[in-house]
Structure formats: structure tokens, C-alpha cells
Amino acid sequence: MRIRYLTVPMALLTVSVMNAKERPQPNVIFILVDDMGYGDMSCHGNPVFKTKHLDRLHDESIRFTQFHVTPMSTPSRGQLLTGCEALRNGASWVGTDATHLRTDIPVLPEVMRSAGYRTALFGKWHLGDNYPLRPQDRGFDYTLTYPQQEVGTVNDYWYNDYFDDVYIENGVRKQFKGFCTDVWFQEALKWIDVQRTSGQPFFCYIPTNVTHGPYFAPKEYRDKVLEQSPGLSRDHTSFVATMLNLDDNIGRLLDYVASHGLSENTIILFMTDNGVTMGYDLYNAGMRGLKTHLWEGGHRVPWFIRLPGEEGKDISGLTQAEDVFPTLLELCGIEVPSECHFDGISLAKQITSNKPVPDRILVNQFQRRKQIKKYDACIMWGPWRLLNGIDTDPKDEGARKAMYDARKRGYQIHLELYNVEEDPHQDNNVYEQYPEIVAKLKDYYDQWWNSIEPELDVRGQIVIGHPSENPTMLSATSWKDKYFTQKSDVLQGRKVSDEWVVQVDSPGRYRFRVYRWSPETRSPLRSAINMYYTDTLSLGPYSEGKALDICRSVMNINGDKQSCVVRDGDLYAEFEYDLPEGPADIGAEFYDRNGALLCGAYYVEVYKKD
């Protein structure tokens, strides 16, 4: 099921501020780190590198010690910003249109702005790259970002490689000098500096692209790592270098807040979006599994809140990404708008009044394949984890590895039960020993699934022909089903194609330009180009492209096919259609001189002419 695109008009969001006369609304700085695990900090016991500034933030913060997100980037981000389950809010996966957050569900920046906050984003969004899915469409006054999951993906500016890159500032591409993480924090501090004199509270969201690959890093930080830990692998060296750079940037932010009189009225949140990746082989805090896994190491992450007037402390009890939105609203004195329907709960009383976390059952599930299967989940209650055991930990060997590999290939459902207090590494499946626990968790999950299932295929959709984005650049990263995000696939001309599912905003004449290469390269369809890198340690000095013998392009919109001959030197194939308002399925492909399919069009520019 797919729905017509809807948006929540900000004028219709009913937001009121509690106790406004008694105290000013606090500012909020929200740091979200990509692909960083629970153990990737020295305050959590990491023996390989020291994160002194994160350790300082840890010591000064309320720390939720059993906080869980989904084991993937987009689902976690959607849950954080909507307070709703990933399978309910539309953003359930990566690399397809399953990244598209529903536009009929309010998001945190929309509510904050309606409550009088100035709002800004610096870094990774990953919830949709076209109107009405972009961050500037979802409540942010200022945005500095890039498309998709990492700097350097298919629809990012072609030449971006973490250094002196071209990012999207308020919808317009602009070059910024420096390493990506330095840019996010430097520009955030500039923006905060303007806001602190305005008299308005601010919400500053800094979701970094590190420590997600590719593992590019500033040379000075890599040199520090090579000096301190010379035995690390190439990628581990770069990973640690990005961690140390991130730590220094967090230190600069903490120092700025302290030196500019913001400490007494600024909430700082820190968390990560999924479990460990590159840091797995260095230290995983005794947990099993990593990113994408239902094991504890895939979804248990740090959540720190530094709150004015509150000393650092640990809070136990199960908490989840969906709790962040309602918690932040209560801490900021903002009443929950009637349009918001949270799957999470506010934990403000646990933070300020030492009230225990409620005893509850939580479900952790996201989309792992096109078909979303019932029970492909981790169901959590206290120390208990009832999960689909199909994920192979990198340290599994022999028969254990073969078993999990086979289950994964067949996408089987094979429930296992673990007690993570007694068995933190989840080595001992006790499913048969505790039938009453299994029955309780399955009964809860059945009710949860029945509430989720009707909305599994509902997600936000790209709109073409709207004045807010005309032209619209479609890329293979938003195909309906096929996962296609890596620039290496464009370079090699990967033989795959799919279609875009969009909404036509208004009837009229539409022009379509169909590309193999990103348009800013100005490269002919038949040519080969290379990708060169500033940091050559991980991928350098360049990745080689492959020429394709493209002789014809075919476009198909709602079954109406057109064909176009491609000649030497053509940068794109061009088509025009008269389209009515409403849904449209758009496909475009390239063929060789013998009529054989070469690949889908990786980029299509859509322009409404009248």
C-alpha cells in the first residue's frame, strides 16, 4: 500500500509551552554519531584509544545504560525524530525509497520550531533527498547537509571525498574548506553564536557522517594513531583517527558552551545510530554482534543527556530511540501536539526525579529485505532477549558459523532466547528452558505486529513539478526496490535497473534528462571517467571507471514508452511527457547497439516546463 503524499502544515501544529513565565526554554544541542559502537569510548572501557572529551561529557551527563536503537542508520533516525516505530514511520531501510520518512507524521524539528525555537541541521539527514522529504521541508530553518548515507554516495556531489567538499546549504550547493567533521562543528558553532544573541531558544542537530566508511581521515590525526598504536590495520588506523578528530570537535563545542554562558540553559544530547562497525575488532564492551544484527552489539548504544542543574548518573531499565522525542519535549516545557502519536514515552521524570524506568516490553525490528517477516525482531524485556537468530558474529567459527550463515541465506525465522545479565555475550540459548518467558514475549509481539502490519508499506514519496524543487534530480539511491548507493557501481556500470515511484504535483509538460554520470562531471554517456581522492590511504589514488557502449535510451512512465538514439558526445538522453497530477512510476534504461540492456539510468533530471 502506498499513500498520496501528505505534509503536516506547521500552522496547524498545536504547540504550547508550559511554565514559560517561570523559566526560559532551554537550548538543545543534539549530537548523533554514525556507526559508532557502545565500546568506542574510553569511558566505556576501550583500551585502544582515549576519548577525553567524550569521557568528560559522559561524567557530566545522565547516562541511559540500556538504551536501544535499530541496528541501521535510517530506521534509527526516523525513530528519533518521530517517536514512532521504524516499520510505522516509513523509514525502515537504506538505499531505496524505504529511506523516505512519512510526511504525515510530525518530526521533532517541526514541533520545536512551532514552539518558538530556531532550528538547524549540520551533517547527515538520510531520510529523503527530494521535496517534500528534505530537512528544509521538515522544520529546519538552516540546513548544511549532503544526500544519502555517507559523503561520496551516488547522488552526492561527484568529487566529494571528506576534504574541501561541496555540501548543500539551504538547498544550494556550496564548497566548504576543511575535513567534513570540522566543517559540521565549525559551522554549527557559527550558527549557535548568532542564535545566542537573538533571545530565541535554539535546537542544533549535529548528525555526523563519521564513523561511517569510507575511512578517510586527516593526516595529522592518522599520524597520532600510527605513533600511539602502530600495529593497527589501515582501516582501523583511519577509524581511530576519525574518532580522535570527532572527540576534539566535541571538546571545542563543550568549551564554547562553557565560555559563552550557555551551560546553565543548554541541554546536550549525545548518542549513536546503531551498534559497532569498524571498532568491532578493537573493543565491543563484551557484547555479541554489530551493525545490522539483532544481537546486543547491533543496537545497544550510548545515550547521554547533560542537563543544567543535574549531576551525572546512570539510569538502568530498558529505553529506546522512540523515547527521545517525548523526553525532550517535556524537558523543554513543550506540550505534546495532538498530531503526535508516540510509540515511546517521556523519561523526563526519570532524569529529574529519580523515578524508575517503567517495566515494559520493547520490540526492535526494521526492514532487512523487501519482504518484512513477522518475528524477524529482537523482543526485549528486562534482561531477556527473544530474537531471530540469523546473524553471524564475525568471531563465530565451525558449526555455529555454518548454522547462522545458512539461516541468513534462507532468511529463516529461528527464535532464540538469551538473558543478557547472566550471559552478556549471548552464547547460551535458553529458549527451551523458559517457555513461560517465550510465551509472554511472543504474545506481546503478536499484538505489536497486528498494530504495525497495516502500515508496513506506507512511506513518504518524492514529488516532482513542485515550485520548491524544480528541477528535481532523481538518483538510483531512491529506486523502489534495488539497493544502489555506491559510486563504485556507477564507475563500473553495474547492470541493474529499477523505477522511481513519485507523485506529480500538477499536470503539465515535463522534460526528462537521463544520465549515466552525475551531471556536474559533464561526461558523455559512452565515456569512462575516474574518481580521484584527497586521502589516498584507503581508496587512492583513484578508482577507475568503465566505458559503456550506450546506443539507445528507453524511458517508461506508467507504461508509456519512448526511445531515444544516443550518439558520441551526448551527455544525456532527453524525453518529454505530458503528465497528469497524481502517482507515476518512472523508469529509464540504457541499451547497447545489439539491443542488450546495459544498465538503468543512475540519474534523471525532471523539469516541469509549464
Image (cartoon, helix red, strand yellow):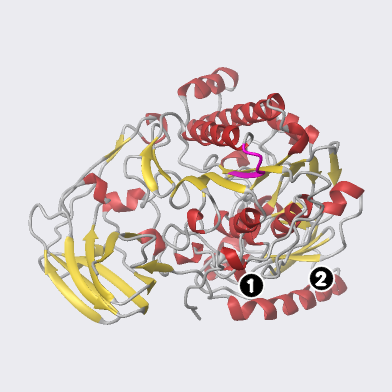
> Relative to 258, does residue 168 appear above or below in the rendering?
below
Q: Amino acid at mark 1?
A: Ile
The secondary structure type at the circle numbered 2 is loop
Q: Amino acid at mark 2?
A: Glu
Decide: marks 2, 1 in contact (CB < 8 A)?
Answer: no
Visible in this render: residue 48? no
Residue 365 placed where, x, y %?
65, 66
Q: Nearer the viewer, residue 588 or 352?
A: 352
Residue 359 placed where, x, y %?
87, 63
- Tell me the tag on residue 413: 1
Dot placed on the residue nearer the N-terminal end, 2 or 1: 1
Q: Nearer the viewer, residue 159 or 266?
A: 266
Is 344 part of what is drawn in magenta? no
Q: Nearer the viewer, residue 196 or 297?
A: 196
Closer to viewer: mark 2 or mark 1: 1
Please tell me how many numbered marks the rendered image carries: 2
The secondary structure type at the circle numbered 1 is loop
Tell me which residue sits at (32%, 44%) in the image: 158
Name the image quarter holding residue 325.
Answer: bottom right
Q: Which residues are magenta?
A: 198-205
Rate crowding at label 2 as few (under 14), some (14 to 19) or many (20 or more) other CA atoms within 10 Å.
few
Residue tagged by mark 2?
432
Tell me which residue sits at (59%, 29%) in the image: 249
Name the image quarter holding residue 436.
Answer: bottom right
Q: Nearer the viewer, residue 270 or 394?
A: 270
Tell me which residue sits at (60%, 36%) in the image: 192
Determine whether, in the image, residue 594 is placed left or right of residue 220: left
**Where, quadrant-wise, is the C terminus in this rendering?**
bottom left
Residue 414 placed where, x, y %?
67, 70
Determine whether, in the image, residue 206 is placed left or right of residue 430: left
From this viewpoint, which residue is outermost toward the front?
21
Mark 2 → mark 1, Cα distance in angstroms: 16 Å
